[in-house]
Image (tube, rainbow, N blue to C red):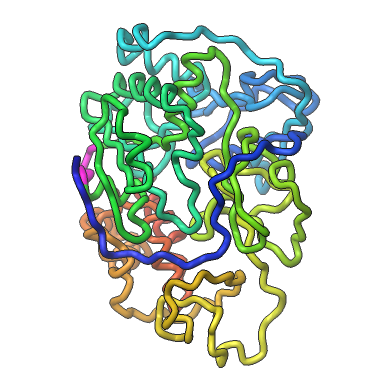
Amino acid sequence: MGVFKLKKGYDIPLQGSAERRLEKAPKTTAVAVQPIDFRSLRPGMKIEAGDTVSRGSILFVDKQKPEILFRSPAAGTVREVVRGERRVIQRIIIDVVGDSAEKFESYTADQVNNFSASQAKEILLNSGLWPTIRQRPFSKIADFDALPKAIFISAVDSAPLQAESDMLLDGQDKQFQLGIQLLSKLTEGKIHLSVSTKTKAFFANIKGVELHEFSGPHPAGNVGVQIHHIDRIQAGEKVWYVSPRHVSQIGSFLTGGEYPSSKTYALTGSELEKGYYVKGREGALVSDLANMAFNNTTQRVISGNVLTGVKSAAQGFVGFYDDMITVVPELEGRRFFGWLRLGLNANSFWPMFLSKFTPKKKLAPTTDMNGEERAFVSTGEYEKVVPMDVLPVHLCKAILVEDIELMEQLGIYEVAAEDLALCSYICPSKIEFGDIIQKGIETMEKEG
């Protein structure tokens, strides 16, 4: 086992972590599959509004690679195909009725052991679970024609209020093991499973993986950071990565012969009286999961965590790759002379507020940015929150001037927006590093 103790990073002290108790969602009225959750996807629709679907019915395919299928997480009626600017399909909303399901072949562990790589790929593509596998560089759905040098799974929970992996799996260790067996057919390299002191006991007996223990502040749990420290991506190489929950989902499909849409979420944030875990549907309507009334004026609902999540609403839907919902106070107007506050209950990476002297105190900050975007100030502090051999400011400047060669030299293939999210959080100039990194990734894809 490799042991990595990272020192660079920052843990934001937030209120509202989820208690280790699991409840069942009070109701399931609607779900959605959102093509906008998948980078570079051009959906080719197979259904339209008014159609009746079963759990596991094909909703759309990837136009560029029609072998990649996207299946329905619930049975019911297609309420609406929501389109945005230029008629880009944003989500397919399904009103849940019953639980009829498409039937697939089921497999035993011995059968899975005898699969070839092509058989494993065919099963994953047909199941609709291929999108659970993503690749670096570019953080998009894995290219099934490629051969990754390794597969990475991160069970290190370091993001703010992050859900704990063992709670998300809900005791599905046998399904997780079977998922590992299938994934092992997809690479000639290793499957790297990263754990923390909290999660290593749950994964200690998993076979077919190389275990690594990571500790330290966020972003120690980011798979990009782990790839950087375990097996760095070199020019021309690809690695794939999967979340622990999706590994378990693959195993559930193999044993059950049905599209597995049951999913555990963490409900977190200071606006909840107490955070907890809830079992619901994949792509669930937010208001279906929490037994409470939301106020979109005074509360911000986020699908994901506060650093990398997407703003949603009570009538919004949870993203495909998100395992948590975070509810924080929404800023109501501007505060008069807010910059003169003592800041007893305001967090800052910089020694700007008195709260800096109580670093362990959990806080409930609002969505206030405490300023707006302004001229960039190079402070030399960004490297303190990025535990990688990457120079965030230099890389972003290379992206902005579209210097392809310099971007490659500075590590554009190794990073994703989430890896530099803390740079945005601590930036006194309010620069969105994640947006710049995303632009760089898109530039590199375009250049081939």
Question: Measured from the top left, where is residue 67 in percent x and y?
Answer: 48, 20
Q: Which picture quadrant has residue 248?
A: top left
Toward the viewer: 369 or 10?
A: 10
Question: Measured from the top left, where is residue 227 in percent x and y?
Answer: 27, 45
Residue 294 drawn above or below residue 195:
below
Question: Measured from the top left, where is residue 337 in percent x and y?
Answer: 62, 92
User: Residue sitting at 25 percent across and 55 percent down?
Assistant: 411
| In this rendering, position of residue 341 left or right of residue 166 | right
The magenta stretch is 230-237
| In this rendering, position of residue 279 left or right of residue 207 | right
User: Residue sitting at 48 percent across and 80 percent down?
Assistant: 374
Residue 367 drawn above or below residue 168:
below
| Labels in figure, total | 0
- Residue 80 in sight: no
Toward the viewer: 381 or 68?
A: 381
Residue 45 drawn above or below residue 30:
above
Question: Measured from the top left, where is residue 299 in percent x and y?
Answer: 70, 63
Q: Which picture quadrant has residue 243?
A: top left
Q: Which picture quadrant has residue 410?
A: bottom left
Q: Is residue 149 magenta?
A: no
User: Residue sitting at 53 percent across and 59 percent down?
Assistant: 306
Q: Quadrant of the N terminus?
A: top left
User: Residue sitting at 60 percent across and 87 percent down?
Assistant: 338
